[in-house]
């Protein structure tokens, strides 16, 4: 009986297998990601968790208000990554970023995440839930993305500027993309895109008709992220949160963090190819 002695063909095959799996499950680039959080923690309170990238040193999610916890939970419908259920009763957690981002100039930022509300709440001035980018202590530097107050729909609330939104479907997972970029003159323009096609590229999503009306006003700055909600019934959740300087990387992170089962096909195919190579050697 002959035995393999780690000959060159076998070694090359192992290298090919490793490379195939690596490219199948790893994003092509993370250089453009400015902050990210995939919530890959055990189920339970989000407060105290400190994974992700782009956050201030030694920064962790901190419970700041409300009577119940925002919790890491099972995947959103149609996905396989972890999610965070936003608690009711004005619960809020926040986390500091590693830098302050200034809008109104020439920079454009793209924030992406998965969103699911079951049900959308209907019109009620006291109900809201979503992800916020804020400058603590500033009344006007506060952009809430998700379900803005008084709308019971899907959109955003830019404090002191309005809350454009459009009706969403109950229990449906959306891929959301928010563009924060230059407007007229020195203004900042906020635009929201959304789709139920969780595999749509960021470039394609940003080329669709905006989900809501574009709001434009003087620029604002932010250096913290909040996850907050105040509502009475149902379940509102997010997943795969990221900000990048381009829509492709922002959306790609969300898709890798909360992939539909179909998106895992590439990894399976790559693994099968690698195994087949080994069998033929």
Image (spheres, helix red, strand yellow):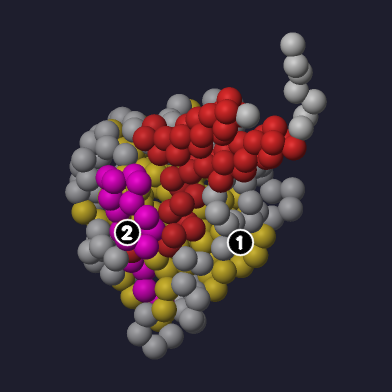
Q: Is residue 46 left or right of residue 190?
A: right
Which one is nearer the viewer's eye here, 150 or 190?
A: 190
Which residue has dot 2 on it? 205
How far is disc 1 from disc 2 in space, using C-alphas?
A: 21 Å
Under circle 2, the secondary element is: helix
Crowd class of label 1 (few under 14; some 14 to 19; many from 20; radius 10 Å): few
Q: Residue furthest right?
A: 5
Q: Eyeballing the image, is 185 above or below 197? A: below
Under circle 1, the secondary element is: loop
Q: Is residue 30 left or right of residue 82?
A: right
Q: Residue furthest top?
A: 1
- The image shows residue 178 at horizontal and vertical percentages of 38, 60
Which residue has dot 1 on it? 31
Q: Is residue 7 visible?
A: yes
Q: Eyeballing the image, is 119 above or below 198? A: above
Residue in the image at 57% along x and 28% along y: 280
Which one is nearer the viewer's eye here, 272 or 133?
A: 272
Q: Residue furthest front?
A: 1
Q: Eyeballing the image, is 181 above or below 121? A: below
Tell me the quadrant of the picture where the C terminus can be found: top right
Crowd class of label 2 (few under 14; some 14 to 19; many from 20; radius 10 Å): many
The question of residue 200 being in magenta is answered with yes
Q: Which mark is residue 61?
A: none
- The image shows residue 8 at horizontal and vertical percentages of 74, 37
Mark 1 or mark 2, which has the lower sequence index? 1
Q: Which residues are magenta?
A: 188-204
Which one is nearer the viewer's eye here, 46 or 93?
A: 46
């Amino acid at each position: 009986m002959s035995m393999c002695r780690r000959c060159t063909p076998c070694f090359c095959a192992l290298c090919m297998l490793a490379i195939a799996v690596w490219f199948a499950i790893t994003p092509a680039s993370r250089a453009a990601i400015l902050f990210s959080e995939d919530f890959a923690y055990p189920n339970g309170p989000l407060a105290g968790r400190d994974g992700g990238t782009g956050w201030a040193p030694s920064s962790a999610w901190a419970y700041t208000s409300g009577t119940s916890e925002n919790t890491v939970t099972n995947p959103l419908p149609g996905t396989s990554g972890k999610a965070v259920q936003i608690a009711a009763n004005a619960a809020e957690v926040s986390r500091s970023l590693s830098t302050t981002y200034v809008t109104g100039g020439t920079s454009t930022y793209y924030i992406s995440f998965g969103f699911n509300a079951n049900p959308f709440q209907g019109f009620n001035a006291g109900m809201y839930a979503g992800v916020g980018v804020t400058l603590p202590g500033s009344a006007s530097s506060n952009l809430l993305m998700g379900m803005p107050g008084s709308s019971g729909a899907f959109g955003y609330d830019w404090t002191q500027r309005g809350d454009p939104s459009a009706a969403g479907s109950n229990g449906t997972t959306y891929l959301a993309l928010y563009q924060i970029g230059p407007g007229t003159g020195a203004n900042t323009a906020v635009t929201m895109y959304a789709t139920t096609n969780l595999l749509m590229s960021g470039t394609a999503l940003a080329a669709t008709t905006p989900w809501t009306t574009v709001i434009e006003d003087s620029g604002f700055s932010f250096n913290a992220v909040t996850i907050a909600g105040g509502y009475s019934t149902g379940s509102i959740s997010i997943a795969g949160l990221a900000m990048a300087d381009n829509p492709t990387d922002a959306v790609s992170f969300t898709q890798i963090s909360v992939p539909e089962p179909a998106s895992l096909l590439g990894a399976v195919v790559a693994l099968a190819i690698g195994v087949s190579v080994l069998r033929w050697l």
